[in-house]
Image (cartoon, grey):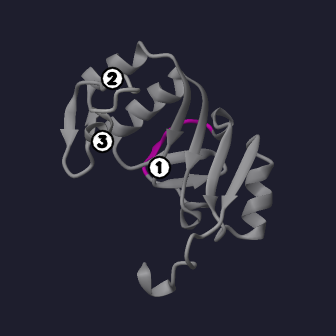
Amino acid sequence: MAGVLANKNHISLVVPGGVCRPGAYVLLGETATKFVRELNCDHYFLCTHALDQAGPSDTLLDLVQLQREMVGAAVETTLIIDSSKFGSRVLYNVVPIQKLKRIITDEGLSVEDRERYQSLVEELVIAPYVDSPPSESND
């Protein structure tokens, strides 16, 4: 993402230091975490591997530590997550679900889960599939 934004005249790009996670283009570690502690931002868009009623969770401790700092630096946080990841959890809790202002997911989310998560966050946004729903064989 930084490479795309680096040469835009109307954008002031700031990136944290840290250790580059192979294949993910994300900088992690204490250097990145210290950098994020100094930030104030209006909005943070968070993506994680799983979500249950307690909150989002992820698989890599360094990433989760950075995500927590970003949630703390932001006025509001939006979780963007695939409907297939609802009702599951992985190794590390990111933040309690109450720290999320909204969740954006796809229309594959069941009616039961829509009702359950609508009561837990201020806003649940269901984005329509652009082409067609994913088939079971694509898993």
Tag 3 residue: 4
Gap between marks 3 and 2 measured at Cα: 13 Å
Comes first in the chain, label 1 or label 2: 2
Give the secondary structure at mark 2: loop
Give the residues drawn in magenta, as a range: 91-96
Mark with earlier residue (3, 1): 3
- Residue 98 against residue 59 in the figure, above or below: above
Residue that numbered label 1 is attached to: 48
Residue 53 part of the magenta segment = no
- Expressed as whole percent of the image width and height from the top left, the position of residue 102 reads 67, 43
Circle 3 SS class: helix
The residue at which mark 2 appears reads as 14
User: How busy is the neighbourhood of tag 2: few (under 14 within 10 Å), some, or many (20 plus)?
Assistant: few
Q: CA distance from mark 3 to mark 1?
A: 22 Å
Quadrant showing the N terminus: top left
Which label's residue is closer to the chain start, 3 or 2? 3
Give coordinates of residue 16: x percent, y percent.
29, 24
- Name the kind of residue labelled 1 in the image: Thr
Q: Nearer the viewer, mark 3 or mark 1?
A: 3
Residue 65 % position (x, y): 39, 31
What secondary structure is marked by label 1? Answer: loop
- On the rendered image, what quadrant is the C terminus found in? bottom left
Name the magenta segment's main secondary structure: loop
Extreme residue in the bottom direction: 137
